[in-house]
């Protein structure tokens, strides 16, 4: 599968919407396999984590480090999450990455990362 197709499968998003857009994909590898993919379009970022890597505490720190150059290049990042019971884990995940909830509009929660959170590697 292509990076965009893996992103769609892991994130549960419509592949057609991702393939017909200006998204740029960045892969993060761990142990010789793609562990996560970041999809970036301007200041907006979305993550798709390989199911075998979900829930690992140390992995979250690696995602922050993976995200660092994207943040430094742009100065801030935003993301959106549909507000339903199935997506609550996603909201907690981006908050643990350092994103702050800014507002909710039409059932979609908007988050912004305006500064990098504390990193154990710093």
Image (cartoon, rainbow, N blue to C red):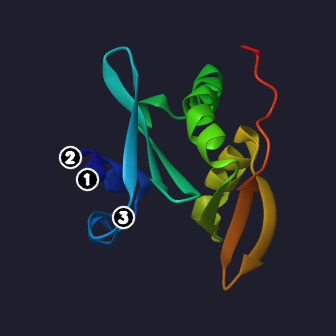
Image x and y of residue 33, in percent: 31, 23
Image x and y of residue 69, in percent: 58, 33
**CA–CA distance in space, label 1 to label 2:** 5 Å
Q: Is residue 82 above or below residue 55?
A: below
Reading the image, the residue beneath label 3 is 22
User: SS class of the residue under badge 3?
Assistant: loop
Left/right placement of residue 2 relative to residue 76 reads: left
**CA–CA distance in space, label 1 to label 3:** 15 Å
Reading the image, the residue beneath label 1 is 5
Pick the quarter of the image with the N terminus.
top left
Q: Is residue 86 above or below residue 62?
A: below
Q: Which mark is residue 25?
A: none
Left/right placement of residue 33 relative to residue 92 reads: left
Image x and y of residue 114, in percent: 78, 49
Circle 1/circle 3 CB separation < 8 Å: no
Q: Please tell me which residue lies in front, 1 or 40.
A: 40
Circle 1/circle 2 CB separation < 8 Å: yes
């Amino acid at each position: 599968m292509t990076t965009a197709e893996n992103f769609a499968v892991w994130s549960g998003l419509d592949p057609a919407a991702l393939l017909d857009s200006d998204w740029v994909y960045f892969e993060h590898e761990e142990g010789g396999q793609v562990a996560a993919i970041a999809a970036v379009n301007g200041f907006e970022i979305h993550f798709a984590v390989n199911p075998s890597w979900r829930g690992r505490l140390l992995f979250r720190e690696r995602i922050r480090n993976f995200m660092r150059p994207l943040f430094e290049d742009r100065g801030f990042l935003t993301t959106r999450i549909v507000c339903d019971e199935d997506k609550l884990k996603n909201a907690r995940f981006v908050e643990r990455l350092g994103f702050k909830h800014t507002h909710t509009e039409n059932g979609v929660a908007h988050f912004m990362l305006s500064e990098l959170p504390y990193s154990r590697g710093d």
